[in-house]
Image: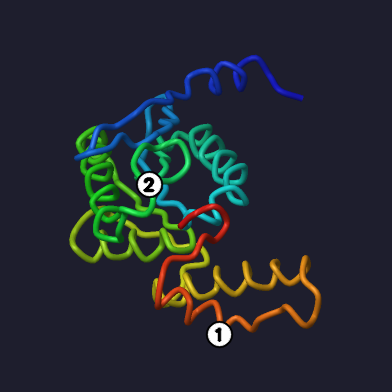
Amino acid sequence: MRTRASQNEQLQEQAGYFEVTGAHLYTVLHPAANPIAHILLVGPFASERHSSYLAWARWARYLAAQQVEVLRYDYRGIGESTGEFSAMSFDLWMDDVLRLGNWLRDRAGGRPLVLHGLEIGGILAAHAFHNGLGDALLLWSSPATANEALRSTLVRWASFQHLFKAAKDRKPPAYYINQLEEKSLTVWGYA
């Protein structure tokens, strides 16, 4: 059962757009009364966003209730952010992390800034942390490389495709990986 206080805390969530070069990042700030720290949630790759969204939002709300201010967002070209996914790159998504991290660090006023990466967001958060952003780093299910994460996503997608095809029409994951290296594929709605 929710108390009146928890309902009021949820009403304080501040959804908006953060302007970056050529796009606007959809952000949700989970403010905390007298925050003891600030956390930037660096989320998963495009195709994993839908399956992690609820857990990510609940985690942010939990942290805010523990006096930790949280900022979560969608990368350029993904989810509610603007931009064309096919024109995006890891360099642009890294820029998103740095811009939002610096904004949150300035807001923190000397309190600790934590970078928390989930899956491919772990690679980006770790890179930003390695380059001096943040006071602590938390990684969940971070792959060793972006290539590993992309191949894993492609293999899951290819396996799902097999559900709708006769055995004679099924292709191994290697076929799709070769296709991806030669041209663009649409995987989970993203080219």
Amino acid of disc 2: Tyr
Q: Name the element at disc 2.
A: loop
Q: Position of residue 28 (x, y in %)?
A: 43, 32
The residue sitting at 40% across, 51% down in the picture is 42
Query: Along the horizontal axis of the image, is 175 left or right of 106?
Result: right
**Disc 1 or disc 2, which is closer to the eye?**
1
Query: Along the horizontal axis of the image, is 43 left or right of 96?
Result: right
The residue sitting at 27% across, 45% down in the picture is 101
Q: Is residue 21 above or below residue 93?
A: above
Q: Position of residue 142 (x, y in %)?
A: 46, 68
Quadrant that contains the C terminus: bottom left
The residue sitting at 81% across, 75% down in the picture is 166
Q: Position of residue 78 (x, y in %)?
A: 43, 46
Q: Residue furthest front?
A: 168
Query: Along the horizontal axis of the image, is 98 left or right of 6?
Result: left
The quadrant in which residue 25 appears is: top left
What residue is shown with label 2? 75
What residue is shown with label 1? 174
Query: Along the horizontal axis of the image, is 174 left or right of 71?
Result: right
Viewer-side residue, 148 vs 184: 184
Using the numbered discs, state the Cα–Cα distance from disc 1 to disc 2 in whole angstroms: 28 Å
Viewer-side residue, 6 vs 176: 176
Amino acid of disc 1: Ala
Q: Name the element at disc 1.
A: helix
Viewer-side residue, 185 vs 114: 185
Q: Position of residue 188 (x, y in %)?
A: 57, 56
Q: Are marks 1 and 2 in contact (CB under 8 Å)?
A: no
